[in-house]
Image (cartoon, grey):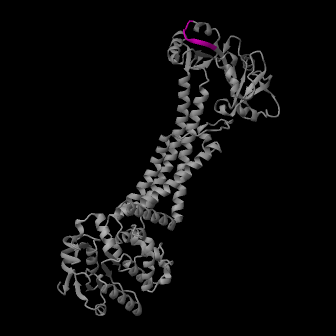
Amino acid sequence: MIIECKNLTKSYAVENTMVHAADTVNLSVNKGDFLVILGHSGSGKTTLLSLIGGLTSPDKGQVFIDGVENWQQSDRALSTMRNSKIGFIFQFASLIPTLSIMENILLPLSFGENPAGSRDLALDILDQVGLADKGKAFPSQLSGGQQRRVAIARSFINCPDIILADEPTGDLDEETERDILALFRRYNEQGTTFVVVTHNSDLAATQKDARVFSMRQGVLSGQAA
Amino acid sequence: MAPRNLEKQLNILDYALSSLWRRRMKSLSVLLVFAAVIFLLASFQMVTQALTDKASQVLAYTPEITLQKMSAGRQEAIPLAYRDRLAGIFGIRRVVPRIWGYYFDEVRLANYTVMGMDVREMPEGDRLDTALAKGTIPGPEEQGRVVVGQSIVKALNLDERNTFSLFRPDLSLKTFTVSGAFSRDTDIMTNDLIVMSLADARDLYEIPAGLVTDLCVYVANPKEIGTIARKISAILPGVRVLTRPQIQKTYQVVFGWRSGFGSICLLAALASFVILAWDKASGLSPEERREISILKVLGWETSDILAVRFWESVIVSGLACIVGMTAAYIHVVYFAAFLFRPVLMGWSVLRPDLHLVPRMAVGNILLILAFTVVPYLAATVIPAWRSATVPADSALGG
């Protein structure tokens, strides 16, 4: 089991009202699974990704990645885990505007793992997302959809075991969306685990053997683990 | 393990450099302001130290004890006969009479210092020739011959002629011939000085025979200065006894006070800079906060983000220190600290054309670093630490 969530609970105070972003969520994900979590805005999908990725700590419950509980680790170990095992695709492109596209993609590799060799890999991934000629450009020179594709390329640069994707095809045109989902499928067939949260119910249909869940007011329901 | 860690640090340093380059206008402006503050502080430190050193060097040749007669709290002429009353004090090597006065040149609106003394009577008198840029010290028999400081040479055009005249109190003129000029190395003491024989000074100021302005006492053992000074005070109660250490201390206090005054002004400027730096650095823009969040999401540790900020600050402050201190050195050595001379040298019309040799003690450098680099590091790293320790999920949700 590569991801395991046990009784995961997270609440936020919004204007003196407690909002349950995750309400006793239990989830088990095996290596190579493709999970699609459907839900409307504010249903807690993004919070669930943050909890799984160790970006925010739960009020209650536990998250295990490869058997290791996220919040029992030091900041260093948690960072190393995020860096080596997880690729994030944000709801918004989240590129650093003053870095070139190539520099943005190489950013997760700033830890001495042969960045020189990784440049070829970055070029290859850029080619796979259809932006081979944009390496030297800056985010402001790209459209929203192109920036999203760069963020997707960046999430693959470390060859992570898990991809956590938040509305990955949100602002892509149909053709690009198809290409990106095909890319996801290829990586998934090679063993990469995907947890995709989206409000697009059609997305699940494009992935073979996808496990589909729905989320509403922090409660996860659907396929049992 | 070590090479990977080193490579990681190099990558972080590379990121810090590129980050500075990306914000080059902001980085450059901070660097320039920072360098200007360090330049001012370092210049002040260097020039104060150089002046104090120079004063100490020159004062080493002044009499160990100077006696002045006081009346109603003011100085008046001292009888030469007092010399005889000092004869019984063991340890006094020599007592040399001196006429020390000032001459106001109404044409040039400048004050000259006049010293009438038979310098050959001084224990080190023969060595005074080494303090001259040209000529010789006139002997007591050489009436009307003087040695002048560099500002006098300039003020009276003595490069082109070698005689000049000063007015006696009765407005009759007394003419002098220049027999030598003091070296620039002694400017701090001799810049506005005219040295002449005792008889010439007596004639110029119309001081009656048997009186001088002060008596210079030279002692055999410098360690006995204090003891001999106390004995003189006991024998001559109406006489002010000034020891060389007291005079040296007075100079140091004067420079110290002026330096302190200037330092307070500079520290105020420094405080403004630190507040500005804090404001700029602590008010992390939304883009900067977002960048920190993205880096954390991508697996950067809090310590990596702090390391980036630390290296950025070290690069900016290090460069500012190098630029500021180099500029300060050039300012002091090649431009004779022209920005601070009015404050540090006093308000005389004839200001010494000083050739200062700056000296920066390690303690002074550390002090400047403590007042500049450390606050800047704190002002940049602490806000980044505050941002880096909050959950990074803000970058996800948008």
Choose between A62 and B154: the one closer to the eye: A62
Residue B8 in the magenta stretch? The answer is no
Q: Is residue A46 left or right of residue B281?
A: left
In which quadrant of the rendered view does residue B198 lie? top right
Q: Percent x, y for residue B349?
A: 68, 36
Q: Is residue B110 left or right of residue B37?
A: right
Residue under the point 19% across and 77% down: A23
Q: Percent x, y for residue A138?
A: 49, 77
Above or below B72: residue A140: below
In which quadrant of the rendered view does residue A33 lie? bottom left
Above or below B126: residue B249: below
Q: Percent x, y for residue B181?
A: 74, 29
Is residue B282 shown to the viewer in this render? no
First to last magenta residue range: B88-95
Choose between B353 and B298: the one closer to the eye: B298
Which quarter of the image is occupied by the N terminus of chain B? bottom left
Q: Is residue B221 left or right of residue A221?
A: right
Above or below B362: residue B199: above
Q: Is residue A220 left or right of residue B393?
A: left
